[in-house]
Amino acid sequence: MCLKIFDIIFVLFSAAGLLSSTTAFAASQNEVLSEQRSMRIDSATYYIGKQMYGDAERNLKEALRLEPASRQNALLLSNLGAVQTALGKTDEAIKSYSAGLCISPRSTVLLTGRGALLLQLKLPQNAIEDFNLALEVDSTLSRPRLLRGLAHISLGEHGRAETDLRKYVAAHDDDDYAMALLAQCCEMTAKRDEAISLMEKCIALKPEPDYYFDLTRMFIVNDSLEKAREIVQEGITKFPDFGYLYMLRGYIHRKRYRPSEALADRATAISKGADPKMVSAWIPEK
C-alpha cells in the first residue's frame, strides 16, 4: 500500500514538473517571438525613414505573421497600408487598411489613411464616408477635414468644400495650399472679392507661378485689366519660364488693342511649354 501511494505521489510530482517545464518552454518561446517581432518593427521603422519601402513592407508583414492575434496589429496594418501606397500597390493597401479597421473600426489613423487612398483612386464619395467617421470620432482633426474638402471639390460640391476649408484655414492660416483651395471655392460660389483676397494671401505666404496665374485670371474676370497686368508682370519677373503667364499677358494686350504684342506673347507662351490649344483659346492666331 505504501509503495502504491509513493508511486502515485511520484507520478503527480512528475506531471507537475512536466507541466511546469512545458509552461516555461512556452513562455520562453513567446519571449523569443516577441523579441523577433520587435526587431522586425524596428527594422520597418528604419526602412520607412530611409524610404526603402520594399524592405519596410517585408518586415511589417513578418511582424504581423509572428503575432497574428495582437491588438497592436491595427497600427502595423496602418503603416503597411501607407508603405504599400508608396509602392503603388493600391489594392493591397486598401486590404491592409480594411484589415486594420476590422481590429480597430474607429481608428482615425486608419480611416484617414484609407480615405486618402480612395481619394487618390478617384473614389471621392467612398473617401468622404471614411473622413466622416474619422471626424465623428474626433471633430478637431485637421487632415481628414482638409481631405474631405478636397473630395467635395472633386464632386463639384463647392459649398460643402468651402465649409470644411474655412474651418481648416481658421486653424492653419499659414497653409497656402488650403487657402488656394478655399479661394477656388469662393470663386465658384460667386465670392470673387474674397477669392482675390485669399489668392493675394497665398502669394504673400508662398509665391508660386500657379498662384500668380489664378490671381491674374481672377482680375481679368473682374475686368480689372490694369491690376491683372501688374500681377502678371510680377509673376513673369519671378517665373520667366512659366508659359501660361505670357498667355494671360498676351490676352491683356489683346484686350487693350495691342495685337502685335499679344501675338508675341502667344509665341512665347507656346515656346515655354503652354498648351497650344489653350493659348489659341485665349489669343487667336488671327
Image (cartoon, rainbow, N blue to C red):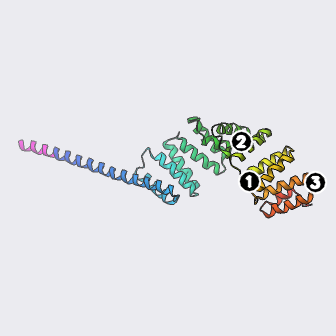
In the image, taking residue 75 as reference, residue 26 lies left or right, namely: left
Mark 2 vs 1, N-terminal side = 2
Q: CA distance from mark 3 to mark 1?
A: 26 Å
Label 3 Cα neighbours within 10 Å, binned few <14 / some 14-19 / many ≥20:
few
Tell me the residue that label 3 is attached to.
Answer: 257
Could you tell me which residue is drawn at 74 percent across and 49 percent down? Answer: 211
In the image, taking residue 50 as reference, residue 211 lies left or right, namely: right
Name the spot of residue 74 as percent of width and height, x first.
48, 45
Count the numbered circles shown.
Answer: 3
Please report the bounds of the magenta region as a residue range: 2-11
SS at mark 2 in the image = helix
Q: CA distance from mark 2 to mark 1?
A: 18 Å
> Is residue 1 visible to us here?
no
Tell me the residue that label 1 is attached to.
Answer: 209
| Amino acid found under the numbered disc labelled 3 | Tyr
Between residues 183 and 240, which one lies in front from this camera angle?
240
State if disc 1 and disc 3 touch (CB < 8 Å): no
Tell me the residue that label 2 is attached to.
Answer: 182
Between residues 257 and 144, which one lies in front from this camera angle?
257
Find out whether residue 16 is within the magenta segment: no
Q: CA distance from mark 3 to mark 2?
A: 34 Å
